[in-house]
Amino acid sequence: MILTTLSVIPGREIIEHYGMVSGSSVRSKHAVADVLAWFKNLFGGELRAYSNLLESTRQEATDRMIAQAEQAGASAIVGVRFSTSQVTSGAAEIFAYGTAVKFG
Amino acid sequence: MGEFSFDDWLIHLVLGTLIDFVLAYRAFVIPVGLLALGYAVGTVVENRHLDSLRERERLALHLPTATYEETDLPAEAIADARLVSGVAVIAIDRFKLVAGALRYFFGGVVPAHETLIDRARREALVRMRAAGADAAEIVCVRLATANIASGAVEAIAYGTAIYRKPA
């Protein structure tokens, strides 16, 4: 599965469009990371636990989008975008969306 | 029991007065102390991060990164195109939190928070470039921000890494 943020697949030709596919993942913060974050908040700096959480959330949303595209029989997703929203305080959603296509 | 010298007596008096002062005014001393500590350590941490960012951005200069939605490379020269991304979560230090809160009261520019979001975005971009280090270029770069942790700035950078066919 080729993923690109462009509206074309560089070096290849799109022969079929399958429409929009999307995937989302909601993660909440957890207590242990939050205690560490409290200490970090004294001095600033990177919250590595939350960076990892954000990365795995993004990966899961992407995987769900890919699963949807595979179901449609696509071989690539073009115009991929990520968007985020806060569901409640302490939980956030990452939404991945794009257009499923087949290349020749 | 040992002899109680004048020096010991003086040290006890000074230390005792100090401890009494801290305990009596703990509602004031502890928050202000944490604030001062946050400012001092926060500034050191921020400067070190900015130095490291500048260094890594300099090392990544050879890799063109652009937001436009096309590539200059001819189709026959392209081996692969891949989605690359980088994320970063930067904590707000206590001093900046308080300084920002004061700013919100009066309104206006909040420089304390500007540097935070700047650091988070640049860190995410540097990581994205590291993920596509072997690429010829990264095009159609987009930035997004998230908010899982309160009191932290979270940035996501993503784009399409274009790989050239070996000549």
Image: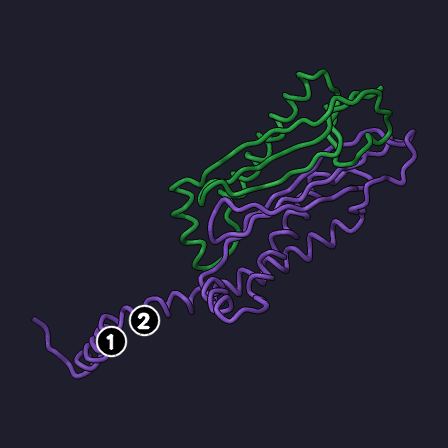
Q: Which chain is green?
A: A
* SS category of the residue bearing label 1: helix
Residue at the spot 57% in from the left edge and 29% down from the top edge: A60
Three-letter code, disc 1: Phe
Residue A18 is left or right of residue A41, and the answer is: right
Residue at the spot 48% in from the left edge and 60% down from the top edge: B93
Q: Are marks 1 and 2 in contact (CB under 8 Å)?
A: yes
Q: Is residue B135 above or below residue B27?
A: above
Picture quadrant where residue B165 is located:
top right
Quarter of the picture containing the C terminus of chain B is top right
Q: Which mark is residue B10?
A: none
Q: Dot 2: within a 10 Å radius of its alpha carbon, few (fewer than 14), some, or many (20 or more) residues?
A: some
The image position of residue B117, as x and y in percent, is 60, 56
Residue B120 is left or right of residue A99, and the answer is: left
Q: Chain of mark 1?
A: B
The image position of residue B27, as x and y in percent, is 28, 68
State the hue of chain B: purple
Q: Is residue B34 above or below residue A69?
A: below
The image position of residue B160, as x and y in percent, is 76, 37
Which residue does the numbered mark 1 point to in the structure image?
B21
- Mark nearer the N terminus (1 vs 2): 1
Residue at the spot 32% in from the left edge and 67% down from the top edge: B30
Residue at the spot 49% in from the left edge and 36% down from the top edge: A27
Residue A2 is left or right of residue A35, and the answer is: right
Three-letter code, disc 2: Val
> Separation of disc 1 and disc 2 at Cα?
9 Å
Q: Do the residues at discs 1 and 2 belong to one chain?
A: yes
Quarter of the picture containing the N terminus of chain B is bottom left
